[in-house]
Image (cartoon, helix red, strand yellow):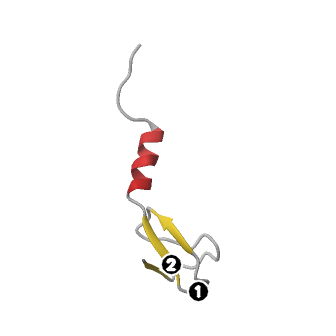
Amino acid sequence: MCSTGGGPDVEWNERLKASKRYRCKDCEQTFESPSKRPMCPSCQSEDVEAV
């Protein structure tokens, strides 16, 4: 049986392509996130800005 189209891996890759880079205003950590409401992975702060 042959299948076409995407699976979970394709969906994840599309999300990563849509990621934006952010900087935490509290701890200065920079990170990427596909979320519209990103949270710093280091200190869990939501006080971040796009860079």
Farthest residue to the left: give it. 5
In the rendered image, residue 46, in percent from the top left (x then y), is placed at 52, 79
Which mark lies nearer to you, 1 or 2?
Answer: 2
Which part of the image, by quadrant, shows the C terminus? bottom left
Helix, strand or loop for disc 1: loop
- 4 on left or right of 9: left
Circle 1 crowding by C-alpha within 10 Å: few under 14, some 14–19, many from 20: few
- Examine the image and state in which quarter residue 28 appears: bottom right
Q: Quadrant of residue 35?
A: bottom left
Label 2: which secondary element: strand
Q: Vertically, is 19 above or below 44?
A: above
Q: Residues within 10 Å of mark 2 (few under 14, many from 20)?
A: some
The picture places residue 47, in percent across and down from the top left corner, at 51, 83
Residue furthest to the top in view is 1
Q: Which residue is drawn at 45% across and 70% down?
A: 21
Q: Residue at label 1?
A: 26
The residue beneath circle 2 is 23
Q: Do the residues labelled 1 and 2 touch (CB within 8 Å)?
A: no
- Compared across the picture, whether 49 is left or right of 28 comes to left
Residue 35 or residue 20, whichever sits in front: 20
Q: Which residue is drawn at the image coordinates 61% and 83% (left, top)? A: 27
